[in-house]
Image (tube, rainbow, N blue to C red):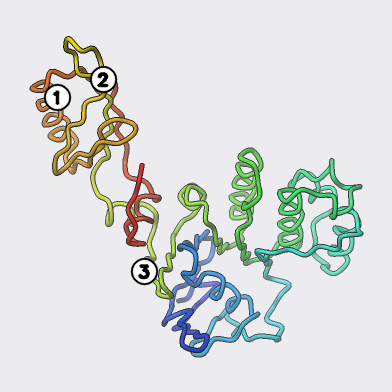
Amino acid sequence: MADAVIEVSHISKSYGSTVGLRDVSFCVEKGQVVALLGPNGAGKTTLLEIIEGLRRPDSGEVRILGARVSNNQHWGGRSVGVMLQENRLPLKLTVAEILRLFRSLRPNAMPLKEIVDRFQLSRILSRKTEHLSGGERQRVAVAIAVMHRPSVLILDEPTNALDPISRQAFWEELLRIKREGCSVLLATHQIEEAEAISDRVVMLNRASLIADATVRDLIEGTCPGFRVTCRAKKVDSLGSGDIGLVGPDWQSTASGLCGNAADLGQGLARAAEAWATAGARIDSVEVARPSLREVFFVLSGEEYRR
């Protein structure tokens, strides 16, 4: 594909009798953020290691910016930024020393002040990395991965240890990096993260590619219609209590009654008629489109619990 910056073509990998990846193909196009999702054991780590050149596939190939990737071979690292899932920073160096070290290795690196400001590192510059929290180490690792303004960025669980405020700040920074012309492959277990910032989602399950589409197309193709959640009370001589109207389209949940409706108006009308017959009073109605989280459960073959 002419605009592809990462091309994964028919990648397979086995470990003895265990299949790690089975004929996986997809691409990341220029200017896109592509989220890589999948349950534990789906093959995400193996795939990322092959893309990064850390592991050799049994068959297939990966190209980044047109150059074929193979292990232990330089493939244009100046144009690529990588953040591994496990980052082993030098424990006895301060954050400032580490940033200066990596800047010295990258001729096009951002000014130190810009790096510090963009990744909120000013308060920890003088601290040794052995005294940093998990989230603080993550911020330093991301800063190292992007300080040279790469054209392609590969991130493995970058927000894993971040608190909600830091995670939101990272999302904003990642979108800023995208606007600056960087293409991103993001492996994450944070489904809300994928839904919020990705242009496309690639999903693995049991070593195979099972989805490759925009978030909207995945939701509409897998979980069409609306999800309606209602809280209702039955008014009688015994007082108030949650009622449990369970039918083919509705199920009782901890938050009330929950069901899917392809036609919102008809779905609500049917529900209202049933509740009126039962003598119920509707306290609240929540209407929402199904989320990427529900799609994830459906495609993984697991039961979704609201």
Query: Horizontal and vertical percent for residue 88?
Result: 78, 65
Residue at image point 66% right, 42% down: 166
Query: Horizontal and vertical percent for residue 284?
Result: 29, 22
Residue at image point 12% right, 18% down: 279
Inspect the image, locate mark 2, and give the three-letter code of the amino acid beneath it: Gly
Q: Is residue 148 left or right of residue 255?
A: right
Of the image marks 1 and 2, the number of the one nearer the N terminus: 2
Vertical order, 25 against 172 (above or below) = below
- Give the labeled residue for mark 1: 275
State whether residue 207 appears in this view: yes
- Give the labeled residue for mark 2: 241
Vertical order, 190 against 240 (above or below) = below
**Quadrant of the image containing the N terminus:** bottom left
| Residues under numbered marks 1 and 2 in contact, where contact means CB atoms less than 8 Å apart | no
Query: Horizontal and vertical percent for residue 33?
Result: 52, 59
Q: Residues within 10 Å of mark 1 (few under 14, many from 20)?
A: some
State whether residue 65 appears in this view: no
Residue at image point 90% right, 54% down: 94
Residue at image point 60% right, 75% down: 49
Query: Horizontal and vertical percent for residue 283?
Result: 27, 19
Q: Residues within 10 Å of mark 2 (few under 14, many from 20)?
A: few
Mark linked to residue 210: 3
Q: Secondary structure at mark 2?
A: loop
Q: From the viewer's side, name the closer residue of 89 and 257.
A: 257
| Residues under numbered marks 3 and 2 in contact, where contact means CB atoms less than 8 Å apart | no
Q: CA distance from mark 1 to mark 2?
A: 13 Å
Q: Residues within 10 Å of mark 3 (few under 14, many from 20)?
A: some
Inspect the image, locate mark 1, and give the three-letter code of the amino acid beneath it: Trp
Q: Is residue 128 left or right of residue 1?
A: right
Q: From the viewer's side, name the closer residue of 114 and 14.
A: 14
Which of pointers 3 and 2 indicates the residue nearer the eye? 2
